[in-house]
Structure formats: structure tokens, C-alpha cells
Amino acid sequence: MITEIPVVRPALLGSDTFALLNNLRGFRHVFRWAYSAGIDVRKLRLVLEDALALRERYQDDVEKFITKLRTSVKRRPKP
């Protein structure tokens, strides 16, 4: 998702967006498997901050990805 594949597709996500998603994935894993343990409110606040930051970055990355795809399709020679 963060790696561009030349001639096939651009990267979907930037490295910052991927890092935020990875943090959320880690939290989801802990939350899912350690549900009997209490949730640390400080950690929950950090995850919430990441989620809010991700909201804007993810949308920007997807829009850039779509724009790059459309541009590459326009440049391709017709068979």
C-alpha cells in the first residue's frame, strides 16, 4: 500500500498515513485480545489523536492516488 509499483500503480498511502494506520491496528489487536484488562485512558487519547489525524491524511492520500491513476490512464497509448 505504501510501495509504488512502476507501470502498474502508484503508492496508495504515504508513510505517515501508514504509520497512523499501523498504530490503530496495534491498538485494535490489544483491545480485541485483552478486553478483560482495563483501558489506559492516556493510551486511548493517543489513539484518538491518531484516528483524527488519519481521517484527513487518508482522504488526501486516496484522492492523490485516484488523480495519479487517472493521469497514468490518459498517458497510456491506445492499443
Image (spheres, helix red, strand yellow):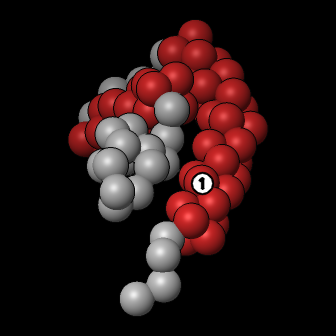
**Frontmost residue, 25 versus 66:** 66
- Residue 26 appears in which quarter of the rendering? top left
Q: Amino acid at mark 1?
A: Lys
Quick check: 26 left or right of 58?
A: left
Q: Residue at x 74, y 38 (%)?
A: 56
Q: Position of residue 37 (x, y in %)?
A: 34, 27
Q: Residue at x 60, y 54 (%)?
A: 68
Q: Position of residue 3 (x, y in %)?
A: 33, 40
Q: Residue furthest bottom?
A: 79
Quick check: 9 left or right of 52?
A: left
Q: Residue furthest top?
A: 42
Q: Residue at x 34, y 57 (%)?
A: 7
* Image vertical order of residue 71 relative to residue 5, above or below: below
Q: Residue at x 36, y 43 (%)?
A: 4
- Residue 42 appears in which quarter of the rendering? top right
* Image vertical order of residue 45 relative to residue 35, above or below: above
Q: Position of residue 53 (x, y in %)?
A: 69, 28
Quick check: 15 left or right of 3?
A: right
**Frontmost residue, 55 versus 29:** 55
Q: Is residue 36 visible?
A: no
Q: How many marks?
A: 1
Q: Is residue 22 visible?
A: yes
Element at badge 1? helix
- Neighbor class of circle 1 (other Cα within 10 Å; few <14, some 14-19, many 20+) is some
Q: Which residue is mark 1?
A: 68
- The quadrant of the rendering that contains the C terminus is bottom left
* Image vertical order of residue 77 relative to residue 27, above or below: below
Quick check: 68 left or right of 15?
A: right
Q: Position of residue 15 (x, y in %)?
A: 45, 26
